[in-house]
Image (spheres, helix red, strand yellow):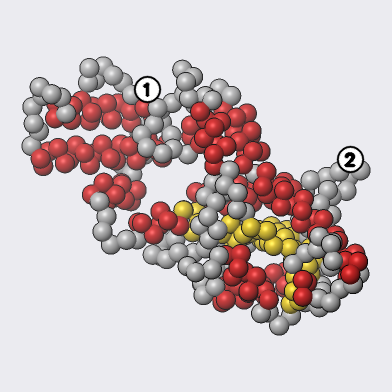
């Protein structure tokens, strides 16, 4: 893809017949140094400030997790594991998770702080105090800032109050979040890029605001040559509704390694799902015991077709433990010692 999401979105808004590029306006010299917003739309009824999330905070998660890795209760996993599934095994996991959320979402708060000031300055410069304030957040490739993380943080910031009971960010009416690194999960073999709109609690003309958002989202889908599916039935956004775009593209590739096919088959028929955690770990222990002679120096070779069955079952077991976030340290050892 040649141009960045930021460049394409700027090009999109600039070509709209009802938009004005604020930097192109002939403003008085006294306003040259003002921190102003990016666009005006709908006869200046709305002001758009564009922010790209470009600083990847993933290292903060690794640094925090490393602090706890040597703890006795720290779990053992195979492969990559979601942070929330790691932390559930630690007695202070919820507190650590709150710290992580605060640390990785700081860039979103910084964007809010700057955008609020820029929209406020634009209202003053152009004498349009009643304009809607649109903050558009773009996430092109920061994987740790998932739809759930950003939407949750945005909701917190939109409802943040000052001591006098007034909104802290008074100039941001609505936030439009556009992702290019995630896809909505679907039975279709297609990439569906999520675009999330989060309304603030401001007392504004919701009909007019909804009309502007409807126009912008529809025209953006047309401009970006992507299908548009609109829903307002999602009561709470969850990361389980989305998949990393790179992972989805890999799954859609024609050639797949055997273990990927086994994982996909298990997802379609998760036959271990009805078992208790203890029973799943016991199942894995027995499988490991059956395969062990094939890997020992003085062990005996297991016929290929039988070993393939064991490896398929072992892959299914790992897929289930990853789904549940089970600690492999708790797998019974007596079964194969």
Quadrant of residue 335 within the rendered picture: top left
Q: Circle 2 sits in a helix, a strand or a loop, which is it?
A: loop
Alpha-carbon distance for marks 1 and 2? 49 Å
Q: How many badges with numbers are in the image?
A: 2
Closer mark to the observer between disc 1 and disc 2: 2
Residue closer to the observer: 308 or 134? 134
Q: Earlier in the sequence, mark 1 or mark 2?
A: 2
Instruction: Give residue 25's position: percent from left, percent from top.
Output: 81, 76
Specify the quadrant that holds the C terminus. Answer: top left
In this rendering, the answer to whether 190 lies above or below 241 is below
Q: Is residue 26 visible?
A: yes
Q: Circle 1 sits in a helix, a strand or a loop, which is it?
A: helix
Q: Is residue 68 left or right of residue 178?
A: left
Which residue is identified by label 1? 330
Residue closer to the observer: 308 or 48? 48
Which residue is identified by label 2? 163
Q: Residue at (65%, 44%) from the top-left corner?
A: 105
Q: Residue at (41%, 39%) from the top-left corner?
A: 80
Q: Is residue 227 left or right of residue 26?
A: left
Instruction: Give residue 290's position: percent from left, percent from top.
Output: 17, 28
């Amino acid at each position: 893809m040649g141009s960045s999401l930021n460049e394409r979105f700027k090009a999109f808004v600039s070509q709209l017949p009802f938009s004005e590029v604020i930097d192109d306006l002939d403003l008085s010299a006294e306003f040259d140094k003002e921190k102003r917003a990016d666009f005006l739309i709908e006869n200046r009824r709305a002001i758009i400030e564009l922010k790209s999330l470009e600083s990847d905070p993933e290292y903060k998660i690794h640094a925090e997790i490393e602090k706890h890795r040597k703890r006795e209760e720290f779990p053992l996993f195979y492969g990559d594991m979601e942070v929330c599934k790691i932390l559930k095994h630690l007695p202070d996991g919820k507190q650590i998770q709150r710290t992580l959320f605060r640390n990785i979402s700081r860039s979103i708060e910084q964007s809010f702080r700057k955008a609020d000031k820029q929209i406020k300055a634009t209202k003053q410069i152009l004498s349009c105090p009643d304009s809607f304030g649109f903050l558009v957040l773009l996430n092109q490739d920061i994987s740790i800032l998932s739809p759930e993380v950003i939407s949750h943080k945005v909701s917190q910031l939109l409802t943040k109050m000052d001591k006098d009971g007034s909104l802290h960010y008074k100039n941001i009416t609505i936030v439009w979040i556009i992702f290019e690194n995630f896809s909505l999960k679907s039975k279709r073999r297609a990439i569906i890029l999520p675009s999330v709109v989060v309304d603030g609690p401001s007392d504004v003309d919701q009909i007019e605001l909804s009309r502007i958002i409807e126009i912008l989202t529809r025209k953006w889908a047309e401009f970006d040559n992507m299908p548009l599916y609109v829903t307002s039935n999602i009561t709470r956004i969850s990361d389980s509704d989305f998949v990393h775009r790179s992972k989805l593209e890999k799954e859609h590739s024609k050639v797949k390694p055997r273990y990927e096919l086994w994982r996909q088959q298990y997802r379609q028929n998760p036959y271990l799902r009805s078992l208790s955690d203890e029973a799943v770990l016991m199942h894995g222990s027995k499988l490991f015991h059956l395969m062990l002679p094939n890997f020992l120096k003085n062990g005996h070779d297991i016929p290929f077709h039988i070993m393939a069955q064991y490896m398929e079952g072992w892959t299914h077991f790992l897929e289930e433990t990853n789904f549940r976030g089970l600690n492999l340290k708790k797998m019974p050892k007596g079964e194969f010692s």
